[in-house]
């Protein structure tokens, strides 16, 4: 019963608004495919393509941020589990007075 009353109320509100759908913004709009890359016609022979004002800023921002990311990843600190465990093991072995680097003894060499 309650659901049918809500349905009637919604139908009345829709009828008052002229049956329009407010969120649809009319018919779907899109650019028809023209067969040209990015919808631009190629310039006539002997003429150069004119860049738009935002293109240089986009190139600088895009490739500059990529270069910045490469530099930051190259100098990123090593915070991995294995490197932490190696540092911790070295510190504990030094605290016990043990050597953490292998040095072969003279008697173990084969002659």
Image (spheres, rainbow, N blue to C red):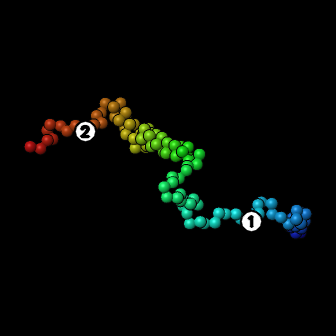
Percent x, y for residue 81?
Answer: 43, 43
Q: Nearer the viewer, residue 27 or 13?
A: 27
| Disc 2 + disc 1, Cβ < 8 Å | no
Image point (55%, 63%), residue name? 36
Q: Nearer the viewer, residue 49 or 84?
A: 49
Q: CA distance from mark 2 to mark 1?
A: 76 Å
Left or right of 111? Residue 4 is: right
Residue 87 in the image: above or below residue 63? above
Image point (42%, 41%), residue name? 74
Please name the residue that numbered disc 2 is placed on.
Answer: 102
Please name the residue that numbered disc 1 is placed on.
Answer: 27
Residue 6 in the image: above or below residue 79? below
Percent x, y for residue 97?
Answer: 31, 30
Local SS, label 2: loop
Residue 57: tell me if it is visible.
yes
Q: Which mark is residue 97?
A: none
- Please state, as top left, top right, bottom left or bottom right, where the C terminus lies in the image: top left
Percent x, y for residue 108?
Answer: 15, 41
Q: Nearer the viewer, residue 31 or 20?
A: 31
Left or right of 38? Residue 12 is: right
Local SS, label 1: loop
Labels 2 and 1: the sequence-earlier one: 1
Percent x, y for residue 87?
Answer: 38, 37
Tell me if mark 1 has few (under 14), some (14-19) or many (20+) residues whose alpha carbon lies within 10 angstroms of its own: few
């Amino acid at each position: 019963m309650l659901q049918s009353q809500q349905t009637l109320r919604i139908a009345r509100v829709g009828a008052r608004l002229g049956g329009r759908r407010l969120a649809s913004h009319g018919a779907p709009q899109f650019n028809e495919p023209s067969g040209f890359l990015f919808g631009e016609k190629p310039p006539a022979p002997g003429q150069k393509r004119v860049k738009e004002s935002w293109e240089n800023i986009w190139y600088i921002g895009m490739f500059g941020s990529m270069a910045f990311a490469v530099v930051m990843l190259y100098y990123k600190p090593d915070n991995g589990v294995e490197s932490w465990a190696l540092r911790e093991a070295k510190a504990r072995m030094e605290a016990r007075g043990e050597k953490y680097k292998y040095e072969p003894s003279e008697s173990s060499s084969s002659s």
